Image (cartoon, rainbow, N blue to C red):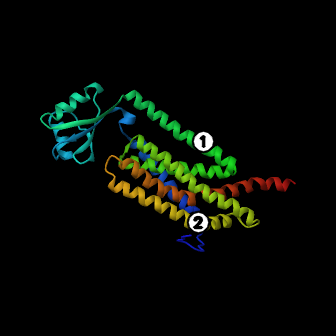
């Protein structure tokens, strides 16, 4: 079996004050950006018309945008989707006017309308609400699943790590104003599954080592478990990272939102599995023991 790390002794748990501090700073920054700048919702959540247009001659996105602004038809979002193909997103007051606006803007240009998607603002709001519910339900089911498979304090660590991943990724989307669309939502749910899988692998190792190394301090056992699974974690994360980074760099603007969410998710998810989820078990263990001490004295 290929191993990048052998016989490592990294003290992850006792560095938790530093890692928790870094994560807390990133979460606060993300929350501030979410409240101040908000999110850049695509037509899936805000409503509008998205049209895929193919041109018979070479034309740039800037030239296309100029055709709209010259005729006072707004400033549409234009993304390349292929050779002389563009996704043009507009937000007309009346969605039925979308075709007319396109014809008016591109009059005299030889083009073919390949596809058009129209979503009303009310439907967009419903999709946004349902998406938040879907993420919330996913986290609740994770809490129940980990509690049944392991113990409640394991579930707390896992859910805290997942919430950490989602908040920081959302924060980066807010800071850079990347578009939130349905593919991006799919990426967020994928991040939840990916991070959870990585966390469960480490938790499985911790549970086994707790049985084998009875009597040892909990922090030492968790450190030992993380180091044991480090090679597997790094190899899995790197193989996934290489795929999604290539997709982000060469997949084009249409796939950028999905791929950049996955890139961030793989990095943050790997980090949180080792530096957030596992150390929380030690914090929980210390607090649990502190509550037990007064009972022991009474006896």
Q: From the image, tell me which residue sits under label 2.
A: 12
Q: Where the C terminus falls, by quadrant? A: bottom right
- Please report whichever mark, 2 or 1, sits nearer to the chain's N-terminal start: 2
Disc 1 designates what residue? 140
- Up-down: is 6 above or below 263? below
The answer to which of 241 and 122 lies nearer the viewer is 241
Figure quadrant of the N terminus: bottom right
Query: Could you tell me which residue is drawn at 41 percent across and 46 percent down?
Result: 33
- Measured as percent of width and height from the top left, residue 104 is found at 17, 31
Q: Nearer the viewer, residue 20 or 223?
A: 223
Is residue 108 visible in the rendered image? The answer is yes
Local SS, label 2: loop
Q: Position of residue 118 (x, y in %)?
A: 33, 30
Q: Is 293 left or right of 179, judged from the image as shown?
A: right
How far apart, in angstroms, are the residues tagged by discs 2 and 1? 28 Å
Mark 1: secondary structure: helix
Residue 113 shown left or right of residue 18 in the figure: left
Say which of 243 and 234 sits in front: 243
């Amino acid at each position: 079996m290929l191993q990048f790390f052998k016989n490592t002794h990294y003290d992850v748990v006792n560095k938790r004050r530093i890692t928790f501090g870094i994560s807390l700073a990133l979460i606060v920054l993300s929350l501030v950006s979410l409240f101040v700048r908000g999110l850049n919702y695509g037509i899936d959540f805000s409503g509008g018309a998205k049209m895929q247009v193919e041109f018979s001659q070479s034309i740039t996105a800037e030239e296309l945008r100029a055709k709209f602004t010259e005729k006072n038809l707004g400033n549409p979002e234009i993304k390349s989707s292929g050779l002389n193909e563009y996704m043009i997103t507009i937000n007309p007051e009346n969605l039925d006017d979308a075709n007319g606006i396109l014809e008016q803007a591109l009059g005299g240009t030889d083009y073919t309308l390949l596809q058009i998607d129209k979503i009303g603002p009310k439907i967009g709001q419903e999709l946004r609400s349902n998406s938040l519910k879907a993420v919330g339900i996913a986290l609740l089911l994770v809490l129940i699943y980990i509690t049944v498979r392991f113990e409640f304090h394991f579930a707390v660590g896992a859910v805290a790590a997942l919430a950490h991943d989602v908040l920081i990724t959302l924060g980066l989307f807010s800071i850079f104003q990347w578009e939130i669309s349905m593919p991006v939502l799919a990426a967020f749910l994928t991040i939840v599954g990916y991070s959870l899988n990585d966390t469960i692998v480490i938790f499985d190792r911790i549970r086994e080592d707790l049985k084998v190394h009875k009597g040892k301090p909990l922090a030492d056992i968790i450190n030992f478990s993380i180091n044991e699974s480090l090679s597997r974690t790094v190899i899995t994360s790197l193989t996934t990272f290489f795929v999604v980074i290539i997709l982000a760099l060469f997949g084009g603007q249409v796939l950028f939102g999905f791929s950049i969410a996955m890139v961030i998710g793989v990095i943050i998810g790997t980090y949180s599995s080792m530096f957030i989820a596992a150390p929380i078990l030690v914090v929980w263990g210390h607090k649990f023991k502190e509550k037990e001490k007064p009972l022991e004295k009474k006896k």
